[in-house]
Image (cartoon, rainbow, N blue to C red):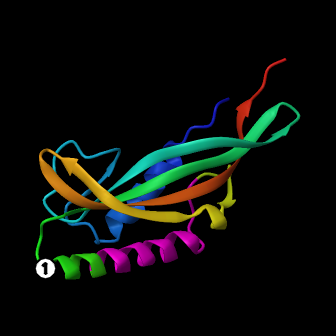
């Protein structure tokens, strides 16, 4: 049976929602409308087979936590400092003993964790974003037939 990423996406979503860091809301997938305040989304990222054993494939499934803040909110320097602090707090949270909610998740791949700040336009508004990539080693996410 194919792996279902729903549990790991929901677990990250629940954690981010409960953290009270995102008054603009937390979604699974990109927001449909421009967020009014700090917001986050949990997005499925790259998937890579890294191991094959007796007809099953294991590998890395990456979930991405994307944060959003209006890029034009003043003062700019404070926003950058806050974004940096937020990135490091989230890295600390997810790199610890975070339970990703699925028994097939073996572990977080530490050397694959990254955070990439950037910009994205949503509904005509420019947002300062950061993509935090969390690669997870997952057992048996595909089965080969003979």
- Rendered location of residue 90, percent (x, y): 44, 72
**Residue matched to label 1:** 75
- Residue 80 lies left or right of residue 136; in this view the side is left
Q: Is residue 11 magenta?
A: no
Magenta span covers which residues? 82-101
- Rendered location of residue 2, percent (x, y): 64, 31
> Residue at (64%, 67%) from the top-left corner?
110
- Rendered location of residue 54, percent (x, y): 88, 34
Magenta-drawn stretch, dominant element (helix, strand or loop): helix
Quarter of the figure that contains the N terminus: top right
Q: Is residue 84 magenta?
A: yes
**Element type at mark 1:** loop
Quarter of the figure that contains the C terminus: top right
> Residue at (12%, 66%) from the top-left corner?
72
- Residue 69 lies left or right of residue 83; in this view the side is left
Give above or below for 140 relative to 83: above
Give above or below for 142 relative to 83: above
Q: Quadrant of residue 35?
A: bottom left
> Residue at (45%, 58%) from the top-left corner?
12
């Amino acid at each position: 049976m194919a792996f279902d990423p729903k549990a790991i996406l929901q677990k990250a979503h629940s954690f981010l929602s409960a953290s009270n860091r995102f008054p603009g809301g937390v979604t699974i997938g990109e927001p449909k409308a421009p967020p009014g305040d700090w917001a986050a989304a949990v997005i499925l990222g790259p998937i890579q087979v890294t191991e094959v054993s007796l007809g099953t494939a294991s590998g890395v499934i990456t979930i991405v936590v994307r944060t959003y803040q209006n890029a034009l909110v003043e003062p700019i320097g404070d926003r950058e400092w806050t974004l940096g602090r937020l990135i490091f707090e989230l890295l600390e949270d997810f790199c610890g003993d975070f339970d990703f909610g699925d028994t097939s998740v073996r572990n977080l791949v530490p050397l694959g964790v990254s955070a990439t700040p950037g910009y994205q336009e949503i509904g005509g508004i420019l947002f300062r974003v950061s993509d935090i990539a969390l690669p997870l080693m997952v057992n048996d996410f595909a089965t080969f037939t003979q």
